[in-house]
Amino acid sequence: MFVKGDRRIVCDVRSILLVQLGDVGDLVLSFPCVRALREHFPAAKIMLAVREKSGDLVELCPWADGAILVSTEKRWLWEQISFQLKFFAGLRRHQFDLVIDLRTGTRGAFIAFLSGARQRIGYYFPLWWRNLLFTDLYDLPYSPGGHVSRHLLDILTAYGLKTEHPIPEFVVPDSKQTAAAEILREAGVDPNGPLPVALQPFSLWQYKEWGEQKYVQLIRHIRDCWQLPVIVTGAPGEQSRAQAIVDAVGGGVFNLAGKTTLSEYGAVLKFCRLFVGVDSAGQHLAAAVGVPTVILYGPSSPVSWAPCGPQHLVVQKAMPCVPCRQTGCGGDGKSRCLDELAIEEVMPSIEQQLRLTTSG
């Protein structure tokens, strides 16, 4: 429902800013929006405003011309004021005609307003002063039965753009593939040998995690029954946890946690035969480079968040409360639906995926 504005894109669009200040997974699921904008405005400059930590991932989006990095670093007051003045001065130099904010927060609204764009489109949110910063507002209640990538496209559909490609895709440049091959080689994996299985056991949120000892059993099974190398991936802060898994397995598994940028991580995943992980950004990166996945879900809804398509399988404990969309049972940060998910319930999906893929 349109709340404010002309219900159409009214300006002569030569330069576009798409604002996505969510986490890495949110950014990946926004790539179809960039593609839709490129197809509708083939000659326009299209930039993405993203969190600083996610910036290099935009290199894998062939429909974007670049990224504007938004820092979340805390600074002293006067240093912060100076930094923000420089940031917004640089923002205005792009002379954006159109800004679209894909979230309902206040920071994206300020970026839209201070960009100086003639048309600033955002989602309606019940915060009156925020809404004043946009020229156009669209109210679209989130549907629990719909996928997030489709939901993100709905605002473009409302303004008359064709949105025929809701599934995120990456294009990995040759330079990134070369770098990824070297990263694998340095870790002890032959990039020209049997394709590895990638595991991402960790999440920003403990209530989404399965349990490290279960991954030890799972890796041993893949190594012993399929003779495949396994790589454990994760963020820099997860290196020690990944190494604990590697040490417990005792051979045939390699620690890549914290050893890649996000774009290099996508390139590394392109070398893999299968991705196995929890509900985190890795599932979206793997799917975007065309790698089959097995994703372990707990209280979250796979209907909304899991990769789409028959090459992607979800394992979720059948319990009356699932999905509850809560951050753990009883507020303790742990999810019984994942704690009670046995390895015997997970392995059939992994076996199925490995039988359907080739080792290269």
Image (cartoon, rainbow, N blue to C red):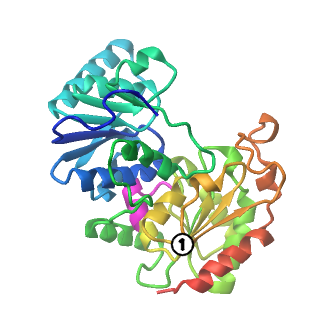
- In this picture, residue 49 sits left or right of residue 211: left
- Residue 279 seen in this snapshot: no
Residue 97: give x, y in percent of width and height.
20, 34
Numbered disc 1: secondary structure: loop
Q: Is residue 143 above or below residue 2?
A: below
- Looking at the rendering, which quadrant does residue 136 occupy? top left
Disc 1 residue type?
Pro
Q: Which residues are magenta?
A: 257-267
| Residue in the foreground of this view, choosing between 82 and 187 | 82
- Looking at the rendering, which quadrant does residue 318 occupy? bottom right
| Residue in the foreground of this view, choosing between 136 and 48 | 136
Question: Which residue occupies 42% across, 62% down?
Answer: 266
Task: Report the number of discs.
Answer: 1
Q: Is 265 colored magenta in this rendering?
A: yes
Q: Is residue 239 above or below residue 232?
A: above
Q: Is residue 339 above or below residue 204?
A: below
